[in-house]
Amino acid sequence: MLPNLLEATKDYWRKLDEVEAAYQRGDLTVAEVDAKVQDLMVELGQERRATLHFVADGCRRLWHEQREAIVGVTLIGVLTYAWVVVS
């Protein structure tokens, strides 16, 4: 499953706005706000870690499947750069 970090961040801010509104209405104490914000940060952190793992796994898979192509294109790029700089 593709993690959607952008949507998770929007959801985090929406929930944070709800917590702020509840605090300003007097429904939550400072301690309750701190606890809820901590929970929201943990939730967003989990989504960030899932996204990082997804990207890292994709890069690892790409490297294992296309190693020769990546090395070849890199080598051509380095040689072209050297040729342009020396000329």
Image (cartoon, rainbow, N blue to C red):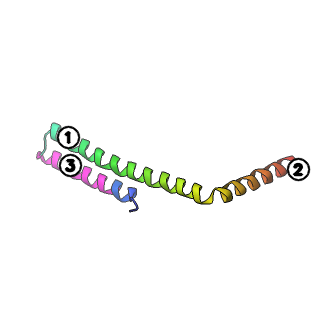
Residue at 59% across, 60% down: 65
Residue at 86% across, 47% down: 86
Q: What's the magenta region?
A: 10-27
Residue at 26% across, 47% down: 40
Q: Quarter of the image holding residue 3?
A: bottom left
Residue 62 against residue 48 in the figure, above or below: below
Q: For mark 3, give the secondary structure.
A: helix
Q: Are dots 2 and 3 in contact, CB under 8 Å?
A: no
Residue ID for mark 2:
87
Look at discs 1 and 3 and give the one toward the viewer: 1
Q: Earlier in the sequence, mark 2 or mark 3?
A: 3
The spot of residue 2 in percent (x, y) is 40, 61
Characterize the local packing of mark 2: few (<14), some (14-19) or many (20 or more) Cα atoms within 10 angstroms.
Answer: few
Quarter of the image that includes the N terminus: bottom left
Residue ID for mark 1:
35
Residue ID for mark 3:
19
